[in-house]
Amino acid sequence: MEGKTEKAYISNTPFLRDKVKTRRQKKNREALVIAGFLAPALLVYGLYVVYSIIMTFYYSLFDWSGVDNIFIFIGLQNYIDLMHDSVFWLTLKNNSLLVVSSLVTQLPLGLIMALLLFSPIKGMRFFRSVYFMPFLMSTVAIGILFTFIYDGSYGIVNQFLGLIGLESFQQAWLGNESTAIWAIIVTICWQFAPFYMILFRAAIVGIPEDLYEAADIDGARKWDRFKNITLPLLMPTIVTSSILSIIGSLKYFDLIYVMTNGGPNNSTELMATYMYSETFTNFNMGYGSSVSFSMFIIAFLITLVIFLLDNRRKGAI
Amino acid sequence: MALLKKIRSMPLYLLAIIILVFTGFPFLIMVNSSFKNQYEFMTKPWSLPDVFTLENYSLIFSSQFFHYFLNSLIVSGISVVIVIVLSAMASYPLARLKFKFNKPIFILFLVGMMIPIHTTLIPIYLLTISLGLYDTIWALIGPYVAFALPISVVIFTMFLKDLPKELEESAKIDGCGHFRLFWKILFPLLTPAVSTVAIYNFIHMWNEFVFALVLTSSGENATLPLGLREFYGEFSVNIPGIMAALTMASLPLLLVYLVAQEKIVKGVAAGSVKG
C-alpha cells in the first residue's frame, strides 16, 4: 500500500519523476554496454562450445550414420550398448592408465627439472632451453619422430639395445600389444614434463628467500629445507598441476592417432580415438556421439570432485 | 672447500645431464638424420653424416610445405587477434562492472577449460558443413577462437582486476564513455596480458591437429601438422626426408623461443595457473 502511494507521489512530482527516469535510463544504458562487451565472446563460445555439447547429447540419442539422412530415435540405447562394449571399457582402462602414469611420471620429473634449475650448476640457461623444447614441438611431429625412434628394424631404441648387447629385448615397440601403451606413455612424459617444470619453476620463484635463510640459521639440511619449506609451499601448484594432468590425459588424441591409431588390437585405444574412428571411419555418428558425451560426463564429474575437494581443503585452512 | 663443493655438485650434474640426454636426444636424432642420405641413415644411424646433404631440404622446398606453413600462419594469426579482441572486451564487464550475471558468466568460461574438445567435434563438423565452410582454412578460426576464449578471458579478467579503480573514475568525470574508456585507457595497460594470451594461444593453435583433421579434407587447405602427416604417408620410405620436414616444422617455434625465452615461459606459466 505504501509503495503505491510512494509511486503515485513520485509520478506526480515532475522533479522526482525525471530523476527516476534518468536513473532507469542510465541502468538500461549500462546493461546495453555490458551486453555489447560480452556478446561477441559469448556468441562464439555459445555456438562452438555450449551449443555443441547440447547437440552431442542430442545426436547420441539416434541411430545415425552421419552420411545419409536416416535418423532413427533410439533413446538411450547407444549408452546401453556402450556399457556392453568391451572396447569402450578398454578405452576407459587405457585413459585411466594415462591419468595415473602422467601423475607419477610427468609431475615428479617436472619438479626435479625445476629444482635442478635452481641448483648451483653451470650452464643453467642451456639446460633450461633444452629441457623446455619438447613442449614447443607439435604433437604430430613428436608422434612421427617417436614412431621412428621405436621402429623395429632401424629404431634408435633397438640400435641402442644392440649396442649394449641386449639384442633379446629388441622388438617393434609400437607393434607389440604389451609394449605399445608404455612406449606412448614415455613419449607423453617427454612432451609434457617440461610444461610442469615451468609451472613449478614459477612457483619456486615465488617462495620468499628469507624462509630459507631462517632455515639455514636453524641448521636445516638440504632435504629438510625441501621437505619443510619447498614442498608445502608448492602444494597449491601440485594440486593445479594434478588437475591439469588429469584433465589433459582425458583429452589425449593426436599422439595416439599418429603413432598407433589405437592399435595393435585396440591396445592403445583411448576414448577420443575410439570416438573418432566410430564417427569418421565407421560412420556411426550416433554411437560416436555417445562416446563423446561420455567423455564430457567423465570430465565434468572429475572437475566437480576436484572442485568440492578443493573447497573443503580451502575451508579447512 | 671449493673442491668439496665441486664433488658435492657432481650428482646434480649427472642428473642434469641424464635429463638433458632424455629431452635433447630425439631432437639430435631428428636434425642429424635430416642431413643424411637414405643409405647412410639405414647403415649408420648413430654417426654424424659422412656426406652432409641438403637434398632432403631441397625436397621440402619443392613440395607443398610452405603452403601448409602459410595456412597455419594465417589461421593462427587471425585467430589470435580475434581471441585478444573478444576476450579483452568480455573481461571488461566481468572485472570492472557489477551486474547480476557477472559470476555465472565467468564460471561458464572457466568451465570451458575442462571440456574435452572431442565432445564438440561432431556438432562442429556438421555446423561447419552447414555454414559452407567445410574444407576451407576459415573453418578452423571459429573453433580455435572458441576454445581459446576461456583461458584468455580468465587471464584478462585477472589483469583488469589488478588495475587501479581510479583510472575509470577520472575518465568518467571527463565524460568518457565505456567504449573509449576501455580501448583508450585500459587496453593499452593490458599489454603484458596481451602478449601472454597471444603466446599461449599461438603455440596451441600452431600445433592444433584434431579440428584441422576433421574440418578440412584436401591437401590445399591443410595446416602444418596435417601437412606433416601427409609427408609421413608420402615419403614413408624416405625417412631422412621426413626428418627434414619435422625439423623445418619445429624450427619456427624453437627459434622464437630462443629469442623470447623468458616471455614464452612466463606466458605458458601464466596461461596455466589460474587464480
Image (cartoon, helix red, strand yellow):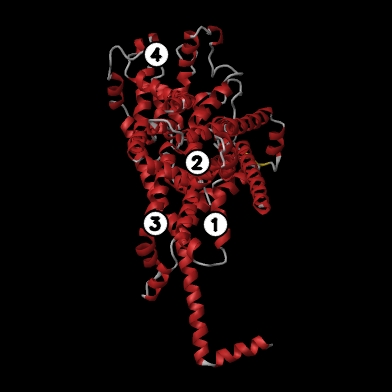
Q: Which residue is mark 1?
A: B106
Q: Are marks 1 and 4 in contact (CB under 8 Å)?
A: no
> Residue B96: percent from the left, percent from the top?
48, 64
Q: Chain of mark 1?
A: B
Q: CA distance from mark 2 to mark 4?
A: 34 Å
Q: Chain of mark 3?
A: B
Marks 1 & 3 on one chain: yes
SS for dot 4: loop
Q: Earlier in the sequence, mark 3 or mark 4?
A: 4
> Residue B208: percent from the left, percent from the top?
45, 37
Marks 2 & 4 on one chain: no
Q: Are marks 2 and 4 in contact (CB under 8 Å)?
A: no
SS for dot 3: loop
Give the amino acid at mark 2: Leu
Q: Quadrant of residue B30?
A: top left
Residue B116 in sight: no
Give the amino acid at mark 4: Trp
Q: Which residue is mark 2?
A: A199
Q: Quadrant of the N terminus of chain A?
A: bottom right
> Residue A293: percent from the left, percent from the top?
62, 42
Q: CA distance from mark 1 to mark 3?
A: 19 Å
SS for dot 1: helix
The residue carrying pointer 3 sits among few (fewer than 14), some (14 to 19) or many (20 or more) residues within 10 Å by Cα, namely some
Q: Earlier in the sequence, mark 1 or mark 4?
A: 4
The residue carrying pointer 2 sits among few (fewer than 14), some (14 to 19) or many (20 or more) residues within 10 Å by Cα, namely many
Query: Residue at the spot x=46%, y=59% of the render?
Result: B162
Q: Which residue is mark 4?
A: B46
Q: Which residue is mark 3?
A: B190
Q: Chain of mark 4?
A: B
